[in-house]
Amino acid sequence: MYAQALDANTINVLANIWTARYDALVSVTQDSVVTVWREMSACHAAACAALERELGERHGLGISDFEVLERLAESDGRKFRAQDLAEAVHLSQSALSRLVDRLARHGLVERCGCDVDRRGVYVVLTEAGERRHAEAVPTHRDVLARHLPASMLSAASSGR
């Protein structure tokens, strides 16, 4: 313990120093957060543009098309309840419905009723959808490998 108490003036000076340092730290932290956000946003935009272009040119798929096929390919039974699929791929139910209509017209997916809940609908990956997905996976992974920062890739491979 201190042998003597700090006077009010000393306390004021210390508080002002602490406040100035805190304000500077917060400012730097906020600036850093904005910088990181902008870098992440730019990376996302570049990767999305490249994915859209290359998946479209090589496989006739958009990013959301591929993501739906990917989620279905990874799921048990190659099917997903439509409501859960919309949430998983970050689309509204109406946007997913239009996307599924388009994929179904091309024979890549089909809809089937849910035996547990009559209102529920499953989206099921067809054999043609499995083939298209398998053909597009190398393109998808190549584009991501080219556009994601090396630091993110190394962190992902090390399990961080």
Image (cartoon, rainbow, N blue to C red):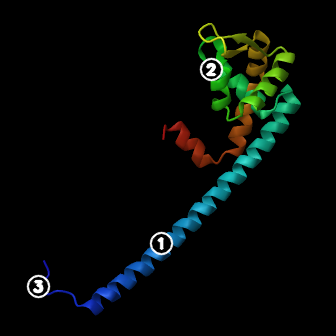
Above or below for 86 versus 13: above
101 vs 17, left or right, is right
Q: Amino acid at mark 2?
A: Glu
Dot 3: within a 10 Å radius of its alpha carbon, few (fewer than 14), some, or many (20 or more) residues?
A: few
Dot 2: within a 10 Å radius of its alpha carbon, few (fewer than 14), some, or many (20 or more) residues?
A: few
Q: Secondary structure at mark 3?
A: loop
**Disc 2 from disc 3: Cα separation:** 68 Å
- Residue drawn where x is 67% and y is 45% of the image: 148
Q: Which mark is residue 25?
A: 1
Total count of labels:
3
Q: Secondary structure at mark 1?
A: helix
- Measured as percent of width and height from the top left, residue 12 is found at 33, 87
Q: Which mark is residue 74?
A: 2
Q: Amino acid at mark 3?
A: Ala
**Disc 2 from disc 1: Cα separation:** 44 Å
- Identify which residue, 33 or 85, lies in the foreground: 85
Q: Which mark is residue 3?
A: 3
Q: Amino acid at mark 1?
A: Leu
Decide if residue 139 is in sight here: no
- Residue drawn where x is 33% and y is 84% of the image: 14
User: Furthest residue to the top?
Assistant: 115
**Disc 1 from disc 3: Cα separation:** 32 Å
- Measured as percent of width and height from the top left, residue 21 is found at 43, 78
Q: Secondary structure at mark 2?
A: helix
Residue 140, image quadrant = top right
Q: Earlier in the sequence, mark 1 or mark 3?
A: 3
- Identify which residue, 24 or 91, lies in the foreground: 91
- Residue drawn where x is 86% and y is 32% of the image: 56
User: Quadrant of the image for the N terminus?
Assistant: bottom left
